[in-house]
Image: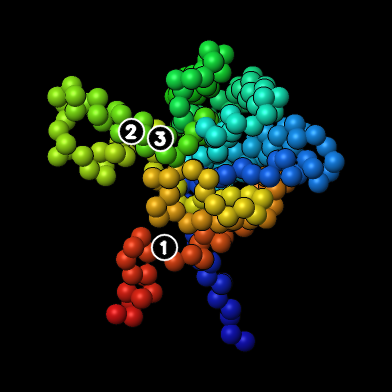
Amino acid sequence: MLKKEPSEQLPSPEPPEHVAIIMDGNGRWARQRKRPRFMGHKAGVNAMLRIIRAADEQGIKYLTLYGFSSENWKRPANEVKELMGLLKFFVRRELAGLNKDNVNIRVIGGRDDLTKSIYGLLVEAESATADNTGLNLIIAFNYGGRGEITRAVQRITRRIEAGELSGQDITEDLVTQHLDTAGIPDPDLIIRTSGEERLSNFLTWQSAYSELLFVDTYWPDFSGKHLQAAIAEFHNRDRRFGGLSAKAAIRL
């Protein structure tokens, strides 16, 4: 009888370096259960914690979560107040644990018009975790992609006016360096929950070559298994970055 050779195990593919998520569907999740919208947002915070830990476990280095858009201020005042309360709750209750887990928190978005209390919370979260070397958690708060590009243009303009740069110095790399996300790699995969299929002003510049995945699951129900399935789908994509696919290049 021939001796069977041990089966060769193929190494698992590397996870995407940067995953970004548009956390959508809290209100519909609550309505489906005949609960107030606030309960949906509260369940959404629990989902955030679940996915932060799942991303860390699955080896993702950068996780960006679209927490609150610059357009969300248009929502009813009571709902905005509840959302700000949840932000405070999240930072006060979870910051110590995230810090202990070596998570590095960075917040992107406009800050000029924020109240002192909210601004202070964001600074506290960043400063408390600044030296951590684990998962890089980027929270998009009071964020809009067009606003971010506008802020980058303003920063570059100020440098030109100060004589540090000239118009000829403006390149794509220079613009990238002046975005809120300076130093953060572009997202490999952007996921949107709830079945909606649009980016809604999220990472407008950075998403040029991101893989987009739209899932029907409402955000409060999104789990580590959903994230794992999204990563598996990502590995089935043929990323070309404007050139030929690897398979087509081989045929040539």
Q: What's the residue at 46%, 22% (across, down)? A: 111
| Residue 126 locus on image (x, y percent) | 48, 23
| Marks 2 & 3, CB-CB < 8 Å contact | yes
Q: What's the residue at 52%, 48% (across, down)? A: 199
Is label 2 in a helix, a strand or a loop? helix
Q: What residue is pinned by disc 3?
A: 148
Classed neighbour count for the residue bearing mark 1: other residues with Cα under 10 Å, few (<14), some (14–19), many (≥20): some
Which circle's residue, 3 or 1, is located before the other in the chain? 3
Q: Any mark on residue 38, and which?
A: none
For the question of whether residue 46 can be seen, the reply is no
- Residue 126 or 211: which is nearer the viewer? 211
| Residue 101 locus on image (x, y percent) | 57, 30
CA gap, disc 2 and disc 3: 6 Å
- Residue 44 or 104: which is nearer the viewer? 44
Quarter of the image that includes the C terminus: bottom left
Is label 1 in a helix, a strand or a loop? loop
Q: Is residue 222 left or right of residue 158?
A: right
